[in-house]
Amino acid sequence: MSKKIDRRDDVNPDEGRRKYGDVEFADPVNHKYPIDTEDHVRAAWSYINQEDNAAKYDPDEVKLIKDRIKRAAKRFDIEIRAD
């Protein structure tokens, strides 16, 4: 499994920082899927499990993003259903 996420051509990483600030992201390269609050973790899980969003990444990148979201969910005591 890859331990990194590639830079996406269809995303401006500055937009994520501008919108959410200096927070932790499940995709820290493209600044997608903020995981700094309970609401953001829930939203990140919902979005990465949408087929059109996941399709923008390689399968190993999706797994890495999901693993990061799951770890953040544990910090907030959020129960994540298996994907």
Image (cartoon, rainbow, N blue to C red):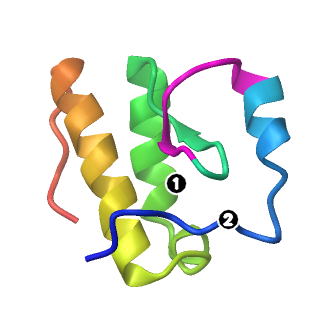
Which corner quadrant holds the N terminus? Answer: bottom left
What residue is shown at x 44% (from left), y 50% (from top)? 46
Q: Quarter-wise, where is residue 28 in the image?
A: top right
In this picture, which residue range is highlighted in magenta?
Answer: 19-28
What residue is shown at x 43% (from left), y 63% (from top)? 4
Determine the secondary structure under disc 1.
helix
Query: Could you tell whether 3 is left or right of 37 in the image?
Result: left
Label 2 Cα neighbours within 10 Å, binned few <14 / some 14-19 / many ≥20 = some
Q: Which residue is identified by label 1?
A: 47
Q: Quarter-wise, where is residue 78 in the image?
A: top left
Query: Could you tell whether 52 is left or right of 69 in the image?
Result: right
Residue type, numbered disc 2: Arg
What residue is shown at x 51% (from left), y 76% (from top)? 51
The correct choice, above or below, for 59 with respect to 32 in the image is: below
Is 76 inside the magenta-drawn segment?
Answer: no
The correct choice, above or below, for 77 with respect to 55 in the image is: above
Residue type, numbered disc 1: Tyr
Q: Which residue is identified by label 2?
A: 7
Query: Could you tell whether 57 is left or right of 83 in the image?
Result: right
Q: Position of residue 67 (x, y in %)?
A: 25, 52
